[in-house]
Image: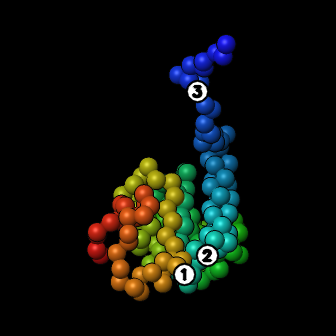
Amino acid sequence: MKHAIDTRLIKPELPQPPTFESLEAERIHRKQRLAAAFRLFAHFGFDEGLAGHITARDPEFPDRFWVNPFGMYFGHIRVCDLLLVNHKGEVIEGDKPVNAAGFAIHSKIHQARPDAVSAAHAHSLYGKSWSTLGRLLDPLTQDACAFYRESA
């Protein structure tokens, strides 16, 4: 006779966010993941043109975030290339220019959502091509359903 397993007793061990011994350790972790995210965006084609950005809030100074330098190819971004900007758009750390449009978009996101650690904005070749057609998104995926029958 087979025994039935009571699935109510099985609790899967889900991955949990990492914990850190210091703010500096958390900052390094975020910056490493941010640099890796840029390289992944480049790998998957989400790097068309100069307009994309990914930001990560600084763990110690919540009114500051790390962002990519203006005009740098996503596939080449390293931790040392990242810029720390404040809520006024001033570069606190780094020696490259910040994308003004990227700052304008992401600073508002980080101000409006203090619970959000990161934000991403990409211009893929496919997305830009689709936008030239003037068509609405068909409700083929759960993501597209969020925008179904909405116009700009």
> Pointer 2: residues within 10 angstroms few (<14), some, or many (20+)?
some
Camera sees residue 68: yes
Q: Which residue bears the numbered disc 2?
A: 45
Quarter containing the C terminus = bottom left
Q: Secondary structure at mark 3?
A: loop
> Does residue 114 lie above or below 133 as drawn?
above
Quarter assignment of residue 101 = bottom left
Between 10 and 98, the one nearer to me in the picture: 10
Q: Are marks 1 and 3 in contact (CB under 8 Å)?
A: no
Q: CA distance from mark 1 to mark 3?
A: 42 Å
Q: Amino acid at mark 3?
A: Lys
Q: CA distance from mark 1 to mark 2?
A: 7 Å
Q: Are marks 1 and 2 in contact (CB under 8 Å)?
A: yes
Q: Is residue 89 left or right of residue 46?
A: left
Q: Which residue bears the numbered disc 3?
A: 11
Q: Secondary structure at mark 1?
A: helix
Q: Amino acid at mark 1?
A: Leu
> Pointer 3: residues within 10 angstroms few (<14), some, or many (20+)?
few
Q: Residue at x 68, y 63 (%)?
A: 36
Q: Secondary structure at mark 2?
A: loop
Between 95 and 128, the one nearer to me in the picture: 128
Q: Is residue 132 left or right of residue 59?
A: left
Residue 94 location (% of width, % of height):
63, 72
Mark positioned earlier in the residue sequence (1 or 3)? 3
Residue 83 location (% of width, % of height):
59, 69
